[in-house]
Image: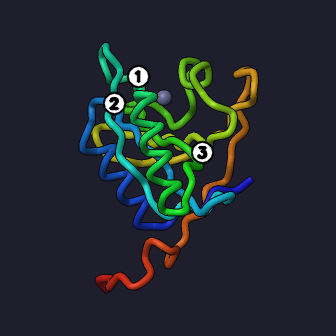
Amino acid sequence: MVIRLGRRTLEEIHAHAESTYPEECCGLLIASSGSKDVVDSVKMRNAFSGPKHDRYHIDPLELFKADREAARRGLTIAGIYHSHPDYPATLSKFDIAHSFAWYSYVVVSVPKGEAGDTRSWLPNQDHSSVAEETIEIRDGMAEDRGVSRKA
Ligand SMILES: [Zn+2]
């Protein structure tokens, strides 16, 4: 399985991850309907009530609203991204336990405040395992059309 990310979207996710360091950031991966062609990302508030350096929580009502907004644009939520400050880009047991099997989970490792290793994971239905998904970075996806690019 492959999830395709536009380069600009990946850069936005990395910038978000660095801006919330040393706390986790989280957001949504917005794709063309019925695909894993991610054309946009939406920043979400980390609503976890405790320390946020190794936890994130997306408010279900905010997720619902974002889902409706994506549908209005003819798009769909293909997954959720979040960051791991000073921790590898793998899903934690907590992440897996709170996952939905229909989403891709993109995790950005942020060692010392700098976004690095970025990997995508597909949890199974019963939260017992995850499979890694290949991330393909693309230039010139829908996000970039008509946008003048520097150099
Ligand atoms: Zn995590």
Crowding near the residue tagged with mark 3, few <14, some 14–19, many ≥20 C-alpha atoms within 10 Å: many
The label on residue 46 is 2
**Could you tell me how many numbered marks the image carries?**
3
Identify residue for label 1.
55
Quadrant in which residue 90 is drawn: top right
Crowding near the residue tagged with mark 1, few <14, some 14–19, many ≥20 C-alpha atoms within 10 Å: many
Where 122 sits versus 68, above or below? above
Q: Alpha-carbon distance for marks 3 and 1?
A: 17 Å
Amino acid type, label 2: Asn
x and y, in percent, of residue 105 in the image: 57, 40
Crowding near the residue tagged with mark 2, few <14, some 14–19, many ≥20 C-alpha atoms within 10 Å: some
Identify residue for label 3.
120
- Determine if the C-beta at disc 1 is less than 8 A from ligand 1: yes
Amino acid type, label 1: Arg
x and y, in percent, of residue 121 in the image: 64, 40
Which SS class for mark 2?
A: loop
Q: Which comes sooner in the sequence, label 1 or label 2? A: 2
Q: Residue at x 39, y 35 (%)?
A: 62
Where 57 sits versus 115, above or below? above
